[in-house]
Amino acid sequence: MLLDERTPYEPVRILAEDGTVVNPDLMPDLSDDQLRELMRRMVFTRMWDQRAIALNRQGRLGFYAPVAGQEASMLGSHYALNKDDFLLPSYRDIPQLVFHGLPLYQAFLYSRGHIHGGQIPRDVHALMPQIIIAAQCTQLAGVALGIKLRGERRVAIAYFGEGHVPGRFL
């Protein structure tokens, strides 16, 4: 595949389409159980996404941004986090909030505009999703600076667009 005639571009692959490993040097150091858990989360997210889209089209779920096709970057980056790390998501990043500890029913309440959908439990280190594109970048800077000033070994991560931007201060 070429971006233009002068720049050859090869996608980075670990697995072939049939599931065989084609680049063992890039295989993550994860156990079979961890890989199964990641797959379970991706399948769960895809099924949730399909159900939420159907509910939205029926008028039973107000605001919902589909996530299909982004599960690996969303859930893979979140899987590397600890419970004490801090999430600053966009409106498309509700699955990370749920796997970080936000009860699933609250995620649906959020999408329905219910007041309790925006009440993050005290032990879930996250802010509510931003709808304005990349508005959470400035919040990320503040959260990361607070973590650094406290001398904590935590990560703050902001999600926006088609990926994420980690903010790590050790």
Image: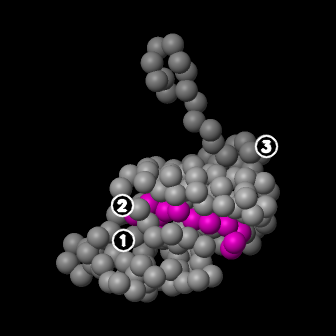
Ranked by sequence position, the earlier of labels 1 and 3 is 3
Distance from the alpha carbon under mark 1 to that under mark 3: 35 Å
Residue extending furthest toward the top: 6
Ranked by sequence position, the earlier of labels 2 and 1 is 1
> Residue 92: percent from the left, percent from the top?
41, 62
Q: Quadrant of residue 53?
A: bottom left
> Residue 163: percent from the left, percent from the top?
51, 50
Badge 1 amino acid: Gln
Locate the C terminus and report the quarter of the image it occupies. Answer: bottom right
Q: Mark 2: give few (<14), some (14-19) or many (20+) Cα within 10 Å.
A: some
Seen at 71% across and 48% down, the residue is 21
Q: Mark 1: give few (<14), some (14-19) or many (20+) Cα within 10 Å.
A: some
Seen at 71% across and 69% down, the residue is 82
Residue behind mark 1: 50
User: Which stretch did the figure color magenta?
Assistant: 80-94
Q: Quadrant of residue 22?
A: top right
Residue behind mark 2: 131
Residue behind mark 3: 25
Magenta run includes residue 52: no
Q: Secondary structure at mark 2?
A: loop
Left or right of 1 in this view: 122: right
Q: Nearer the viewer, residue 142 or 27?
A: 142
In the rendered image of this protein, does residue 3 appear above or below residue 162?
A: above
> Residue 1: percent from the left, percent from the top?
49, 27
Distance from the alpha carbon under mark 2 to that under mark 1: 21 Å
> Disc 1, disc 3: CB below 8 Å?
no
Residue 108 appears in the figure:
no
Badge 3 amino acid: Asp
